[in-house]
Image (cartoon, helix red, strand yellow):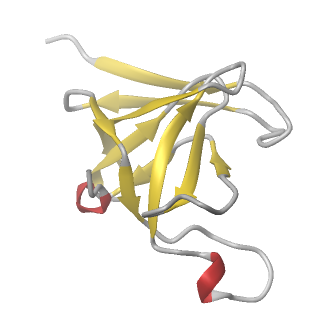
Amino acid sequence: MTCTFITVLVDEHDDLPEGCCMRFKAVGTPRIVRRVRIELERQGPPDEDAAPREWTVKSCGESGELGPAHGILVEDSSAGSSLLIYGGAHGLRLRPAPDGGASAVAEPYLLVAERAVLE
């Protein structure tokens, strides 16, 4: 039986100055992910309006072009398995749902419970 690995390689850029290189063992099939329900960690005092729980998620390419983000079930030592959401050379861009009107939050990838994906 052959193992499949997903390598998340995010280039260093202004929004993610440290970049990212991570490798995950896949246990599922990739799919497109458009919307998630998560709490993003924020610095500073808590502000409920600044951290909505539902986010639209898109992949961000090297030139800043947005496209679909992908999710795949991967092994996770702390949870057994989790859904890895990944994107392009510049990672992911999340915007508050449903309207996506606020500025985007950059993340190299997300590792979430499957139930966090709304569509």
Counting from the top left corner in percent of width and height, residue 67 is at: 49, 28
- Residue at (82, 31) in percent of width and height: 13
Asked which quadrant contains residue 40, the reply is bottom right
Number of disc labels: 0
Is residue 24 or residue 11 the one in the foreground?
11
The vertical placement of 38 against 119, above or below, is below
Counting from the top left corner in percent of width and height, residue 4 is at: 29, 18
Counting from the top left corner in percent of width and height, residue 65 is at: 63, 25
Counting from the top left corner in percent of width and height, residue 75 is at: 30, 41
Q: Image check: 98 left or right of 33?
A: right
Asked which quadrant contains residue 47, the reply is bottom right
Is residue 62 or residue 10 the one in the foreground?
62
Q: Image check: 63 left or right of 5?
A: right
* Residue ranking furthest to the left: 1
The vertical placement of 49 against 16, above or below, is below
Q: Image check: 6 left or right of 41?
A: left
* Residue ranking furthest to the top: 2
- Residue at (46, 73) in percent of width and height: 53
The vertical placement of 55 against 22, above or below, is below
The vertical placement of 38 against 23, above or below, is below
- Residue at (86, 38) in percent of width and height: 14
Check the picture and name the quadrant holding the N terminus: top left
